[in-house]
Image (cartoon, rainbow, N blue to C red):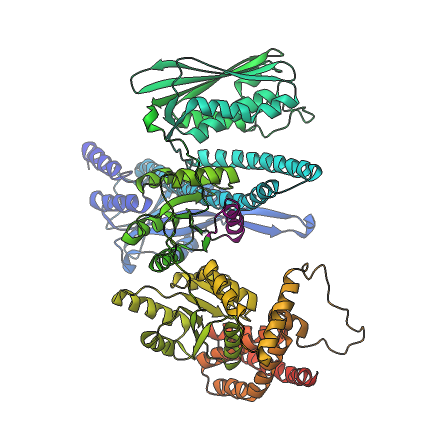
């Protein structure tokens, strides 16, 4: 082969390398190029992988030496057949190369490339420096012109391409991890925003409500201090969350038309008390040409001004703080607003001024600094200004004060574009509050009541739609809905979309609430025709103004008469004890109750009779409660029927069970053992509180002669009222038991009575029934075990779990729960056996104590 031909082959080989950033693809193309331009039959590449090995040395005590061993991992071989590959162990045995990484590299550099023949197989081994080895099998020994020594520089180049591919893969992996981390951060941010603001909503809301009640001077002073501290805490939380949202690109702007002059005045006024405490002069200067009505985000503009003015007041001991507002440029529809905040405070040197807009930077960063704060306010002002298309600059001199100059683009609007809030009487309106968090639901409901409203309550989007439709059919439509934007399942935006598709609900106004506003929320509100959203935590004044703005142009819709009697309720329950307990409790509240023992029977009954409400057990034979609910909702859709309210009753009071029930179309959820007051409240919530309260009052105003059961239930009501008005169990511990006691009791009778609303007679009746049916439950449990019928075994364990919970038999209840869960997991019999016999033993030891309790007066 002449030099020209050799150069051509080497050139073509070089072109085949580095044609892809993916290692496997690049190696495939390179090996094919070798086979095309050299007499190569097959080729194999191994990657050198470093592995850390610890070698313990007795002479070093507890210390160890860490060495990097060399491990070769097979990558590509071509052709892709077993015959084309070579055993690595054979090569290792032939060359006896070093075990450790660095000695291996030295050996490869000194020894390779190497060419040899074995049984008419001509082979060559090249070093890929820093990457691994390349083995070739050729049809004939390589010629002198293309001797391995001449090809090694080309292999060095191949090694560089391989290492480049590895670096590219690592970079791609790191980028993917960074994106995942960013997504995780955004998710964490949204969750934390919700989790932090929710308790703050409770704190500020309750303080607001108490401050509007009758207080003496000392109480008002204490609560004002608490409110100031809570406001300060919320300010810090908002700063941290805003900074995180800006970094994650999740901060949303809500531009709207507002009165600029009014906003400037109210902002300065809100800080007047703080300035007065320090005996500072606080005033603002407005350019006569300043437009009154503009469009931008008023909340963010106010936030920036409060940060700038608050900082000026904080760092000024003597003198004044001034806000100046003027236009620096204007056209027909747009203008540039300049807001200047000046103070006569401590000022800053040039080094501090250079970093003043960075997060956590302050004018004083010493540990013994005089002025407290997080150092986030100015950083957030700068980020918000840039987000709104503006900018901020600062000038300052030590001991002579500072000047912050904020410039923002604004849209000029006409007076007709601004609709001021017109005070209106809210007492005639009906409002439905849809909020999944119990604390927020309670606080906002109390605020609505303070404003003269009696709100309805819902915990999910589907439940809210159901209540809206139901009340509209009863001629008691809601005028407005307050809905959380981030409800689980159907969120607030999907709820509004569904609401807009219902013609009979077209007049219903919607006010969106959010504890963790995300990018695009304001745009979605605008697209849905909403005026925006309120950010939790809410204040009473803020909520009142929003409702007045929402309802100012509307009249309350007509209210209809309520039901003259209690509700017709269908109870689906397979257990006799639970059935009789529920029927007695429901009958006492004036309801008419029908009973079926499985889901299929409930569906049949619903097709042939009319009911107002269904109480549905989840675990029943033939058809469970979830499947029955699914089939009922499908039937209602096919027949065009309004959905009947369904409340779940289940002993599986675990996290996620309530969500599953609501997701299947149920409107409520009551855990077993059923607490009478909890059941009553859930029915009232689902079926409209005012309606049920009126019905119950009418029922009790003309009582029929009371039976023994009625007397017992009256006693339960009285005991329950006492229980609800006493402190928690932690402040009233149970009477001490004798010190010498051979065994702890298997049941907690006082707790069981308390769970049943204080009705000991009703609990004793349940005990009598359980003892009568004890042998039947025991036989069914044994039969299911002997027949290896895991579904039946799980069903019986579930029934026993519910019954044992009624008597507060915690140990036996836990064993039944474990057996039920293990059956659902389909564990092998050798793992179920100890759980089964443990439950049998617990029942046997429990029976004597139940019999003893039965014989007691």
Q: Nearer the viewer, residue 774 or 462?
A: 462
Would residue 376 appear left or right of 550 to someone viewing this image? Answer: right
**Magenta span: helix, strand or loop, mainly?**
helix
Q: Which residue is at the front of the view, 599 or 215?
A: 215
Numbered marks: total: 0
Q: Is residue 269 visible?
A: yes
Say if 290 sits above or below 686 in the image.
above
**Residue 264 place in picture, x, y as percent:** 47, 22
- Farthest front residue in view: 702
Q: Is residue 798 left or right of residue 348?
A: left
Q: Quadrant of residue 81?
A: bottom left
Quadrant of the frame with the N terminus: top left
Instruction: Tell me, yes or no, whether the highlighted magenta stretch contains residue 494.
Output: no
Q: Residue 502, can we see it? A: no
Q: 306 or 73: which is nearer to us?
A: 306
Residue 518: image x %, image y %?
Answer: 41, 40
Instruction: Residue 144: give x, y in percent of width and height.
Output: 27, 39
Look at 62% across and 34% down and name the residue there.
Answer: 228
* Picture quarter with the C terminus: bottom right
Residue name at image x 63 percent, y 78 percent: 761
When asked about the image quadrant of residue 473, the answer is: bottom left
Depth order, front residue of 476/416: 476
Percent position of residue 692, x then y? 47, 63
Q: Is residue 469 shown left or right of residue 783?
A: left
The residue that appears at 46% across and 87% down in the rendered structure is 787
Task: Give the magenta-colored segment's residue range.
Answer: 437-455
Residue 656 position (above or below residue 230): below
């Amino acid at each position: 082969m002449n030099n020209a031909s050799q150069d051509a082959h080497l050139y073509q080989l070089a072109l085949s390398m580095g044609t892809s950033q993916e290692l496997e693809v690049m190696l495939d193309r390179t090996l094919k190029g070798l086979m095309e331009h050299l007499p190569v039959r097959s080729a194999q590449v191994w990657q050198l992988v470093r592995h850390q090995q610890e070698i313990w040395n007795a002479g070093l005590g507890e210390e160890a030496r860490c060495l990097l061993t060399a491990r070769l991992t097979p990558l590509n071989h071509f052709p892709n057949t077993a015959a084309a590959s070579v055993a690595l162990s054979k090569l290792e045995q032939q060359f006896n190369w070093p075990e450790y990484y660095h000695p291996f590299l030295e050996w490869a550099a000194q020894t390779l490339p190497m060419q040899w023949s074995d049984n008419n197989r001509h082979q060559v081994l090249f070093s890929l420096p820093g990457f691994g080895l390349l083995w070739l099998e050729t049809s004939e020994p390589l010629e002198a012109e293309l001797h391995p020594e001449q090809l090694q520089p080309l292999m060095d180049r191949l090694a560089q391409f391989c290492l480049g591919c590895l670096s590219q893969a690592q970079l791609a992996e790191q980028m993917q991890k960074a994106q995942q981390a960013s997504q995780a951060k955004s998710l964490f941010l949204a969750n934390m925003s919700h989790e932090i603001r929710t308790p703050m909503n409770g704190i500020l809301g309750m303080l607001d409500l108490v401050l509007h009640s009758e207080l003496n001077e000392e109480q008002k002073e204490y609560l004002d201090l608490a409110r100031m501290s809570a406001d300060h805490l919320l300010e810090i939380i908002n700063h941290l969350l805003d900074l995180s949202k800006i970094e994650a690109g999740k901060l949303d702007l809500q531009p709207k038309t507002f009165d600029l002059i009014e906003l400037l005045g109210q902002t300065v006024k809100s800080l007047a008390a703080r300035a007065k405490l320090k005996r500072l002069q606080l005033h603002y200067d407005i350019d006569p040409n300043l437009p009154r009505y503009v469009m931008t985000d008023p909340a963010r503009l106010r936030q920036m001004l409060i940060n700038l003015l608050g900082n000026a007041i904080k760092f000024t001991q003597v003198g004044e703080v001034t806000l100046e507002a003027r236009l620096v440029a204007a056209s027909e529809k747009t203008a540039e607003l300049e807001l200047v905040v000046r103070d006569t405070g401590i000022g800053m040197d040039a080094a501090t001024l250079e970093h003043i807009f960075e997060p956590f930077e302050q004018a004083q960063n010493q540990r013994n600094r005089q002025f407290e704060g997080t150092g986030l306010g100015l950083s957030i002002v700068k980020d918000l200004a840039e987000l709104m298309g503006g900018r901020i600059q600062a000038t300052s001199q030590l001991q002579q004060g500072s000047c912050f100059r904020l410039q923002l683009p604004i849209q000029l609007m006409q007076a007709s574009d601004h609709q001021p809030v017109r005070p209106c009487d809210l007492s005639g309106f009906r409002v439905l509050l849809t909020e999944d968090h119990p604390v927020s639901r309670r606080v906002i409901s109390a605020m609505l009541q303070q404003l003269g409203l009696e709100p309805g309550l819902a915990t999910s989007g589907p439940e809210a739609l159901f209540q809206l439709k139901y009340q509209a059919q009863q001629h008691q439509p809601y005028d407005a809905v307050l809905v959380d934007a981030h409800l689980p399942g159907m969120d607030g935006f999907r709820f509004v979309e569904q609401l807009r598709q219902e013609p009979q609900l077209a007049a219903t106004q919607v006010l969106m609430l959010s504890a963790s506003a995300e990018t695009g929320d304001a745009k979605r509100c605008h697209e849905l025709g909403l005026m925006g959203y309120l950010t939790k935590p809410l204040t009473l004044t803020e909520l009142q103004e929003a409702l007045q703005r929402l309802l100012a142009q509307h009249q309350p819709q007509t209210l209809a008469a309520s039901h003259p009697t209690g509700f017709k309720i269908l109870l689906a329950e397979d257990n006799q004890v639970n059935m009789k307990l529920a029927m007695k409790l429901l009958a006492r509240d004036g309801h008419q109750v029908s009973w079926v023992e499985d889901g299929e029977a409930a569906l049949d009954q619903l097709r042939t009779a009319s009911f107002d409400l269904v109480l549905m057990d989840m675990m029943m034979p033939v058809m469970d409660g979830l499947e029955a609910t699914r089939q009922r909702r499908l039937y209602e859709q096919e027949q065009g029927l309004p959905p009947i309210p369904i409340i779940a009753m289940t002993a599986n009071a675990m996290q996620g069970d309530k969500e599953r029930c609501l997701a299947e179309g149920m409107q409520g959820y009551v855990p077993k053992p059923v607490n009478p007051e909890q059941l009553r409240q859930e029915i009232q919530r689902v079926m409209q509180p005012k309606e049920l309260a009126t019905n119950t009052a009418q029922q009790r105003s003309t009582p029929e002669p009371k039976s023994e059961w009625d007397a017992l239930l009256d006693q339960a009501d009285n005991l329950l009222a006492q229980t609800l008005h006493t402190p928690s169990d932690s402040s009233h511990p149970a009477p001490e038991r004798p010190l010498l006691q051979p065994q702890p009791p298997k049941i907690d009778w006082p707790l069981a009575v308390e769970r049943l609303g204080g009705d000991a007679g009703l609990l004793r009746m349940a005990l009598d029934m359980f003892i009568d049916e004890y042998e039947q439950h025991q036989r069914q449990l044994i039969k299911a075990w002997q027949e290896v019928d895991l579904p039946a075994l799980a069903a019986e364990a579930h029934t026993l779990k519910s019954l044992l919970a009624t008597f507060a038999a915690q140990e036996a209840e836990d064993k039944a729960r474990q057996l039920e869960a293990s059956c659902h997991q389909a564990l092998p019999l050798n793992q179920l056996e100890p759980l089964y016999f443990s439950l049998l033993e617990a029942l046997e030891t429990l029976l004597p104590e139940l019999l003893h309790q039965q014989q007691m007066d």
